[in-house]
Amino acid sequence: MPETPGTSNGTDSGTAGARAVSGAGIQLENLTKIYPGSPGPAVDNVNMEIKAGELVIFVGPSGCGKSTTLKMINRLIEPTSGRIRIGDEDVTDIDPVKLRRKVGYAIQQSGLFPHMTVAQNIALVPKMIGWPKAKIGSRVEEMLDLVGLDPGEFHGRYPRQLSGGQQQRVGVARALAADPPVLLMDEPFGAVDPITRDHLQDELIRLQHELRKTICFVTHDFDEAIKLGDRIAILRERSHIAQFDTPEAILTNPTDDFVSGFVGAGAALKRLNLTRVRDVGVVDFPTAGMDDPLESIVALLRSGPTNEVLLLDPNRRPYKWLRRGDLSRAKGTLARAGTLVHDTVTRDATLRDALEAVLTDSAGRVAVTGRRGEYIGVVDMETLMNNVHELLEADRLEAAAQEPEPDEQDRPDQQDRPGGSGADGAQGGTA
């Protein structure tokens, strides 16, 4: 399937242009689905153009046809009428099985085959399309590493031996294994807990930043749509498009009351989902290893710029916050001293994620980690609040700029002025 050049309004617009787009554009032309016996179409005459390398979100009320529209792209559901183009190819009339092998597909609860190992699940499509064994093996290792799972640890496990978040990561790895230009995702994170969901969203943002695939993603969660989408298609009944625009445009200028209902209250605060931790000031922080001599940690605490250090485990992952006051409880060992690190955020986390993590910690900071959980730095409350104030001020200025100028007749100083717009004035009258 040929690639189509294109650009994205991407979540990391500062560097998106420097990365090659590996996705293909998608065009839906008059796409319609009518089920036998139904009084009307489930999807009615949808026209949409998705750019190569974009992550587009379909969001709308239950039963509006968003999942049906998604599944028609890879013809899991056959269209009643209309055309589908991926890149330069009209895929409406080709073999649907071959089409699905060229389009990645990830669903809720991963859809992994329980009798296959992680490696066998990921290798499934490359094996079907005839990749050599050595290439498949290499690709499995690459995919596991890509989604942040240690190949040596997870290669031979079965789905039942994985957490929900790990299963979803493997599901994404399987969908990407044959390097498809298009990835379809149908509420893939809907069945996991909120913390895991946040981490999976961050992982998808990171993957898209690296891979630049064309991704169509269905969700019922508007906050998730804002966080992930380059553009959002808000769908009415029968997949009629109410608004198809960037998250910023939808938050600041919803087209009608239906769209405003999705935005809800607090649009300015929802914009915290549009800025990433990597875009704000991540600073270094005094750290020490758990196995470092106690004397050196004590010296660091006493001479450092802050009254605490962050202890890292052997894999350089944040483990404990250790304050000067904790030293009295150390008694030759750090086993009982300090406070375990409960929350971390990645560089791809949103400011909203970071703010929530900071607010749950009275010390007012959160550790920032890399793809394998390794320590990168710290972001603090002052930095986050400065950015919140900048967003609110920008919204205030934008709202003021959009207010219409008062008409001449509405200006008080014109009412009593000779020749003004009063009842006897000549100016402002009808010629």
Image (cartoon, grey):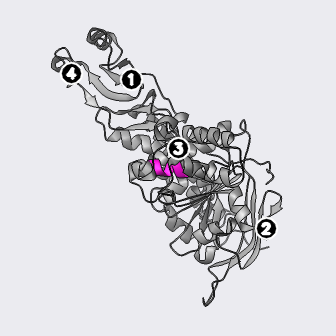
Q: Provide the secondary structure element on which disc 4 rests.
A: helix
Residue 341 against residue 327 in the figure, above or below = below
Q: Which quarter of the figure is the C terminus placed in?
A: bottom right
Residue 203's tag is 3
The stretch in magenta equals: 166-172
The residue that mark 1 highlights is: 314
Residue 94's tag is 2
Q: CA distance from mark 1 to mark 3?
A: 23 Å
Q: Which quarter of the figure is the N terminus placed in?
A: bottom right
Percent position (x, y) of residue 280? Answer: 52, 33
Query: Tag 4: residue type?
Result: Asp
Q: CA distance from mark 2 to mark 4?
A: 68 Å
Query: Tag 1: residue type?
Result: Pro
| Res 345 → quadrant | top left
**Does the magenta segment cover residue 168?**
yes
Regarding residue 79, the answer to whether it shows in the image is yes
Mark 2 or mark 4: which comes first in sequence? Answer: 2
The residue that mark 4 highlights is: 326
Q: Provide the secondary structure element on which disc 2 rests.
A: loop
The mark lying in front, picked from 1 and 4, is 1
Mark 1 or mark 4: which comes first in sequence? Answer: 1
Percent position (x, y) of residue 281? Answer: 50, 29
- Crowding at dot 2, Cα within 10 Å, few <14 / some 14-19 / many 20+, comes out as few
